[in-house]
Each structure stands twice: as structure tokens, then as C-alpha cells.
Amino acid sequence: MSGRLQHKSALITGAGSGIGLESSILFAQEGSNVLLVDVNLAAAEKTAAIIAQKYPNVKAVAVKADVGKEDEVKSAVDAAVNAFGRLDVIFNNAGIMHPADDNALNTEEKIWDLTMQINVKGVWWGSKYAILAMRNNPTDEAKGLHTGGSIINTASFVASMGAATPQLAYTASKGAVLSMSRELAMVHAREGIRVNTISPGPLKTPLLMDFLNTPEKRDRRLVHLPMGRFGEAVEVAKAALFLATDESSYMTGGDLKVDGGLTSSY
Ligand code: NAD
């Protein structure tokens, strides 16, 4: 542990699996207290248990919340402030992808609405309540603590590219995350709140593996990947850690592509 987030507090959504799980462990390793949010409480508790065992000096608190419900997002942010006294980082990472072909002709309105509710409104509400909390962060210059903070939102490579395997609502939702985050960054830059996105490429996590559920579908996606492999969740978590720390202090409104070269390839 090198203490890159020492004395700080972070809230991570989707903390029970994939990117959220790996980020929670990395943030804790760097000294941050972590509020672990997931709709699947048992999964978040498992993450908390891993952290308690590996990094007993930080607090790891698991909370059940559906980011698609505003009152639950607000309660989760309140829980972080109550438990840790401040909120320096929110990683709005939870997201869903309907695990079936979802094109303009066959997608259902209820799938579209649910995807937007969780992937877009969840990021809006997480950002909203985090901004309110970050404005009130106590300062302690000796410990490097100040008002403001870092908001990190998970977009996707499909925010910038068309996917040949249709996932229309998901793609639209991630485009919204990207553009919403840019505007949040502009509006809150002068109060020391940085907002950046991460656009992961295809990863070996349950979200994508449930979608590409045959060897043929996986091989088809692999053809487009310059590195010839799916990414690991921890490779995205390392980018989230950079955006969470002051090492990225002059970065806001940015998008970190962690995609094995996918969005640069033809
Ligand atoms: P994952 O399935 O491994 O983990 C997602 C976690 O989010 C799960 O623990 C799940 O319980 C939780 N979750 C789902 N809905 C929730 C809700 N409404 N409220 C709270 N928690 C909820 O997925 P992952 O691959 O780690 O995905 C994380 C993020 O990365 C998502 O936003 C996803 O869209 C994005 N992403 C993933 C990939 C990929 O290839 N896996 C690529 C680009 C972007």
C-alpha cells in the first residue's frame, strides 16, 4: 500500500463484481475508506470481507442500493458521509446490458426504459448527491484533504462506436453518460469537482460474457480487438484509481479509453 488515497473516502457502485469489485480493492489498498454499493448485497458484502481481510486499516461498508432509484442513491451517499465524514470520490460504475439482441426493430420499450433508468439516471443521481456532499467536505491541508472531489463515470467504447452485435438501448445509454459527464465537468470545474469517464473495451466480466454467450459470438468480437483478447476488470480499475487520485488533478471532462486499442483500429 502506497497511500495514494490515504485519509480519503470513496463510493463505488456495482462493487460486487467486475470493475467495481477490482476498483474497490485497489482504492482500499491505497488507503481509501470505501462504501460498497450494489443491488446484490451479498456480492457487496463479499467485497467488504476481502478488503477487511487484506486491508484492516480502512473501513469497508457494504450497502444495498439500486442506482435506478433516486432515494436509494441519496441514502447511499448519506451513508458514506455518515460513516467516513466526507466523500472524495464517487465511481458511478454500475450498469446493465440486456443479454439479447436489442436492435431498433425488436427492442422493447420496457428494456429501453430500464437501461436508461439504471445506466443514465443512476449516473445523474450519483453525481448529483456526490456534488452536494463534496461541497461540504472538511478541509485539512496537512492531510491533503479539501472540498471538491473526483466523479468517475463508466461509459463504454460503444459510446464512440457502433456495435455490430446490436445492443441499442445500452449503446444509447453510454453515449448519454459520455455527454452528460462532459457537461458536469464544465459546470463544476471551478468548485474543484473533476468529472471524467472511462470507456472500457470488451472485458471478461459476467456482463459481457452473458451477452456473448456462445464461442461464435466471442470469436466475432475478438476479431475486432487489436490485442486479440478480452480485457480484465482490474485493467480498468487501474484507470479508475488514476482518476480518483490527485495524480489526475489537471484532468476533467476527459474520457480514458481502456480498450486494447479497439477505438483506434480499423
Ligand atoms: P459486472 O456484471 O461484472 O458487474 C456489475 C455489477 O453491478 C454487479 O455486481 C451488479 O449486481 C451491479 N448492478 C447491476 N445493476 C445495478 C443497480 N441497478 N444498482 C446497483 N448495482 C447494480 O459488470 P462490469 O463488466 O464490471 O460492468 C461495470 C460497468 O462497466 C457497467 O457500467 C458496464 O456497462 C461497463 N462496461 C463493461 C464492459 C464489459 O465488457 N464488461 C465494457 C464497457 C463498459
Image (tube, grey):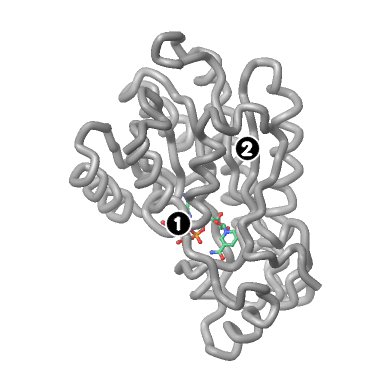
The local secondary structure at tag 2 comes to helix
Residue 264 is left or right of residue 177, and the answer is right
Q: Nearer the viewer, residue 227 or 157?
A: 227
Give the residue drawn at x 70%, y 22%.
Answer: 189
Q: Nearer the viewer, residue 227 or 115?
A: 227
Give the residue drawn at x 48%, y 50%.
Answer: 237
From the top left corner, tell me how far across and down residue 245 is, in percent: 51, 32
From the top left corner, tell me how far across and down residue 99 is, in percent: 56, 73
The amino acid type found where label 2 is placed reads Trp
**Which quadrant of the rendered structure holds the N terminus?**
top left
Q: Which residue is mark 1?
A: 234
Residue behind label 1 places its C-beta within 8 angstroms of ligand 1: no
Label disc, if present, on residue 124 of the rendered structure? 2
Answer above or below: position of 39 versus 134.
below
From the top left corner, tell me how far across and down residue 40 is, in percent: 36, 54
Residue 258 location, quadrant:
bottom right
Give the residue drawn at x 71%, y 40%.
Answer: 254
Q: CA distance from mark 2 to mark 1?
A: 25 Å
Taking the view exactly as shown, the residue that stands out farthest to the front is 2
Give the residue drawn at x 66%, y 54%.
Answer: 257
